[in-house]
Image (cartoon, grey):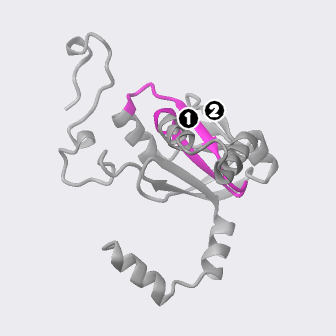
Amino acid sequence: MAESPENNPINEPETSVEAVGGGSGAWDDLQVGFSGNPKAKLDDRGRLKLPAEFKSFLEKKYGKDFNAFYIVSREGEDAEIYPMPEWQAHLARVFKMPKSHPARKKLLERYSLYGDRADMDPQGRLLMPEELRNAGMTNVDVKVSGEGTLLRVKSLSRLRESVKQSEFSAQDVDAMNEFDV
């Protein structure tokens, strides 16, 4: 249950019982993170209105005034949206790789080209980084998929094409079974 402001003198983020795992297994349980895949639209300026279920989860996890994100891409075709604390944890893992590792260098180059901080505006919108907008992430229908610590934004038409081109094989089913999925 959320505390009232009178009982929260140091203005710590308010959380609900459900947000800390006390609910009946709701999708937004903090142990799972972001989950779901609502359809959304990037407007003609490249802004994404964060779907309500993800905004609600963010408020439960980080507090009502949370608005700091980092948006990146590895290939310029989709976007990964990290709440800033998750981005910092992710980047710390990247920095543990040897500086000379070719994969680390490639990844950081892509993050440098496609990445930027994004602050959510009062209407709940996030602006895609300029390079992603230049790559066509404007005025397009997208799927926003929750992937634990991040949100993935992918063009609906590209997602449909990708699914059509990649058959779900018996080997894929076997691999899923290995992980009890």
- Left or right relative to 21: residue 65: right
Q: Quadrant of the N terminus?
A: top left
- Left or right relative to 80: residue 161: right
According to the picture, the residue beneath numbered tag 1 turns out to be 69
According to the picture, the residue beneath numbered tag 2 turns out to be 117
- Left or right relative to 103: residue 180: left
Query: Residue at coordinates 44% horizontally, 45% vertically from top-left?
Result: 54
Q: Is residue 153 above or below residue 8?
A: below
Q: Is residue 123 above or below residue 71?
A: above
N-terminal of the pair, mark 2 or mark 1, is 1
Give the CA separation, mark 2 to mark 1. Answer: 6 Å
Whole-percent x, y for residue 96 in the image = 52, 41
Residue 143 versus residue 175: which sits nearer the camera? 175
Q: Quadrant of residue 118?
A: top right
**Type of amino acid at the residue the image marks with label 2:** Arg
- Magenta region: 62-86
- Magenta residue check for 83: yes
Query: Residue at coordinates 32% horizontally, 54% vertically from top-left?
Result: 27
Whole-percent x, y for residue 68 in the image = 54, 30
Whole-percent x, y for residue 12 in the image = 31, 19
Tell me the SS state at disc 1. Answer: strand
**Type of amino acid at the residue the image marks with label 1:** Phe
Q: Residues within 10 Å of mark 2 (few under 14, many from 20)?
A: some
